[in-house]
Image (cartoon, rainbow, N blue to C red):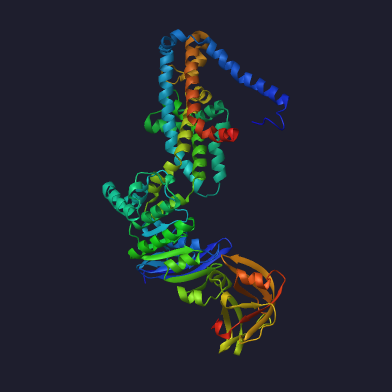
């Protein structure tokens, strides 16, 4: 804090206050409408229960696939040199800035049963289609969530001292052993943060899911879709579900506090 | 010969070209200024940098030979390495760090821990097994790093500036310990350092690297007694001059001449210990054959001794007592006479 010396311009303080109010108002508006006394009963409504169960299941699968494919992808992006690497990274990061509904449309033309790029082949071979199924939800969520994991883990890999890996190799550890016992523990915080971010993104996914997987209760209607659907017909359920998503978001924010805001807090207090 | 290396590595505009042989039970110290290629040489031996030319053979096994397209990855070389800043795994305990190499070789956990414990006890850290490296002192980390490298009984152990990160007292103690541990280990050892004292205390042989080439090599005393480069001369703290000998005189490039006790011929190095140089404010009379005129161009304090840099036809550094500095009023710009007995001049061929 600067008690002496230059002061913060009043105009900046004023505008900042407006911005803070702007962020706080919707939150207060939502919390004011929550019927706290029958919250648990409201969540037991079939539409709400189905949505939460499906959301949790699909978002966890999507986080699992994001880690399974995202960590190797981050490893290759951080460690290998090959032509077109920045192009690949751009492709991977694109879903973060792409409007989700466009992602959903793009997924349709790749994976739908009729005239999809590979959807028809998959259907012919395995008698399986992503659209209108739980796995369609997982696919859509993974598409938008994995980039968060990839860029976080890649940054983690770039920040560790590679000589630790060399030390491990000089001690006789093969590549897998080095990765498992040295690399992964050293990027642990980044991996956890990336997975949490991916999970949060998957949980909140709306546009790509509704466009690609559909909006069928108990099958593809995740919590955000249910909130949107029930806002007109069963408002208390929609509010209760919103509250659940808000609670999860705050929990993730708190768990990531040290990873994302630790450094910033230090500069503020010092 | 256990290790036979002919290392040729190209790193951007820097190229390293060094031939090195190390026998079992022998310690070779690689000495050189920063950027001479010392660490690169070690990394090549460890397999962390592939050779561009030459070959590396350890115990008759070819480890690297670009011409034959042979390259053995670091984890299969059986080479132990102690890194300059130790690189102890921060997420593993001290015991797990030392057991790492044994576990990597597929040795069962219990046995690996037993072996690690044994080595920790040997380096005097048996009671710190369960702690993380972060809470250890510099000297303790160094001991753990040494135990971690030696527990696997490597055929060749590489030490990259193992004492550089330590301060005075710890350094002396660790140097003595390192000597004991290295002596108990039968394999070949290569030690990189830029401290002459480490090299003299720990090594049997010296290899001096400058600009990616061997500037001088041989038994420690040969190198220190007869330096062949400015770098080694400065390290040993001796005046090194170069000239052409004829009769009892060496003519220097700078125009001056040095009188020698024995007859000399051809291109030679002249080495003169700074404490053999006497300084006078007036032209001295007496037996010294070498009397050179010059001007003081720098005064360095070195404990209770003072080094006076004298500029002239024979540029020379004299080591005198602090008292002499006061008596003779030796300071920058003063004209002096430097004298050296011919018997104190060491001359050897280039």
Residue B103 to residue B282: above or below? above
Q: Quadrant of residue A263?
A: top right
Q: Quadrant of residue B187?
A: bottom left
Between B315 and B53, the one nearer to me in the picture: B315
Determine the residue positioned at 65% across, 67% down.
Answer: B299
| Residue A44 relative to residue B18: left or right | left
Number of residue marks: 0
| Residue A209 in the image, given as x and y percentages of width and height | 49, 24
- Is residue B73 visible in the rendered image? The answer is no
| Residue B313 relative to residue A126: left or right | right
Determine the residue positioned at 70% across, 31% down.
Answer: A4
Determine the residue positioned at 52% across, 27% down.
Answer: A104
Q: Quadrant for the C terminus of chain B, please.
A: bottom right
Residue A159 to residue A254: above or below? below
- Is residue A172 visible in the rendered image? The answer is yes
| Residue B279 in the image, given as x and y percentages of width and height | 64, 77
Residue A246 to residue B220: above or below? above
Between A32 and B85, the one nearer to me in the picture: B85
| Residue B99 in the image, given as x and y percentages of width and height | 33, 50
| Residue A181 in the image, given as x and y percentages of width and height | 38, 45
Q: Quadrant for the N terminus of chain B, please.
A: bottom left
Determine the residue positioned at 44% across, 71% down.
Answer: B205
Residue A39 to residue A53: above or below? above
Between A47 and A254, the one nearer to me in the picture: A254
């Amino acid at each position: 804090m600067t008690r002496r010396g230059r002061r913060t311009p009043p105009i900046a303080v004023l505008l900042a206050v407006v911005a803070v109010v702007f962020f706080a108002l919707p939150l207060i508006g939502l919390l004011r409408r929550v019927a706290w006394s029958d919250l648990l009963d409201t969540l037991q409504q079939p539409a709400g229960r189905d949505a939460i169960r499906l959301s949790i299941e699909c978002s966890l699968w999507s986080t699992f696939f994001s880690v399974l494919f995202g960590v190797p992808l981050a490893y290759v992006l951080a460690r290998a040199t090959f032509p077109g690497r920045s192009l690949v990274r751009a492709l991977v990061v694109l879903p973060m800035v792409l409007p989700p509904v466009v992602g959903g449309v793009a997924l349709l033309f790749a994976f739908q049963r009729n005239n999809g790029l590979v959807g028809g082949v998959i259907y012919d071979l395995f008698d399986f289609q992503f659209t209108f199924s739980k796995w369609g939800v997982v696919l859509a969520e993974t598409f938008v969530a994995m980039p968060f994991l990839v860029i976080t883990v890649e940054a983690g890999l770039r920040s560790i001292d590679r000589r630790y890996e060399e030390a491990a190799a000089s001690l006789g550890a093969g590549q897998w052993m080095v990765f498992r016992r040295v690399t992964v523990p050293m990027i642990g915080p980044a991996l956890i943060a990336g997975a949490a971010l991916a999970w949060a993104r998957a949980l909140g996914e709306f546009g790509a899911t509704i466009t690609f997987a559909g909006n069928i209760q108990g099958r593809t209607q995740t919590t955000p879709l249910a909130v949107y659907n029930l806002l007109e017909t069963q408002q208390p359920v929609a509010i209760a579900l919103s509250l659940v998503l808000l609670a999860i978001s705050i929990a993730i924010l708190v768990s990531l506090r040290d990873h994302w805001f630790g450094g910033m807090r230090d500069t503020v207090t010092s | 010969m256990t290790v036979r290396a002919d290392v040729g590595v190209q790193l951007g505009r820097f190229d390293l070209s060094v031939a090195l042989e190390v026998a079992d039970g022998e310690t070779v110290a690689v000495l050189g200024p920063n950027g001479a290629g010392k660490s690169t040489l070690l990394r090549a031996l460890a397999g962390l940098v592939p050779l561009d030319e030459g070959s590396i053979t350890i115990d008759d096994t070819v480890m690297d030979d670009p011409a034959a397209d042979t390259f053995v990855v670091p984890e299969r070389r059986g080479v132990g390495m102690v890194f300059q800043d130790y690189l102890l795994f921060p997420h593993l305990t001290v015991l797990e760090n030392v057991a790492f190499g044994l576990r990597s070789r597929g040795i069962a956990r219990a046995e690996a821990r037993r072996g690690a414990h044994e080595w920790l006890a040997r380096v005097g850290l048996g009671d710190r097994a369960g702690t993380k490296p972060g809470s250890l002192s510099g000297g303790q980390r160094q001991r753990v790093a040494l135990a971690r490298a030696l527990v696997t009984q490597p055929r060749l152990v590489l030490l990259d500036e193992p004492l550089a990160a330590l301060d005075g007292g710890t350094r002396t103690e660790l140097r003595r310990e390192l000597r004991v541990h290295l002596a108990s280990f039968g394999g070949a050892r290569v030690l990189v350092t830029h401290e002459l004292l480490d090299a003299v205390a720990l090594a049997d042989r010296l290899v001096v690297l400058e600009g990616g080439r061997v500037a001088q090599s041989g038994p420690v005393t040969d190198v220190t007694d007869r330096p062949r480069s400015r770098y080694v001369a400065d390290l040993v703290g001796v005046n090194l001059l170069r000239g052409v000998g004829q009769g009892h005189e060496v003519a220097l490039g700078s125009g001056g001449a040095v009188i020698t006790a024995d007859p000399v011929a051809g291109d030679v190095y002249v080495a003169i210990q700074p404490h053999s140089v006497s300084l006078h404010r007036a032209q001295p009379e007496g037996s010294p054959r070498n009397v050179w005129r010059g001007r003081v161009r720098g005064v360095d304090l070195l404990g209770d001794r003072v080094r006076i840099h004298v500029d002239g036809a024979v540029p020379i550094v004299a080591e005198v007592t602090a008292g002499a500095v006061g008596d003779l009023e030796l300071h920058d710009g003063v004209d002096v006479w430097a004298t050296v007995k011919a018997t104190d001049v060491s001359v050897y061929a280039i």
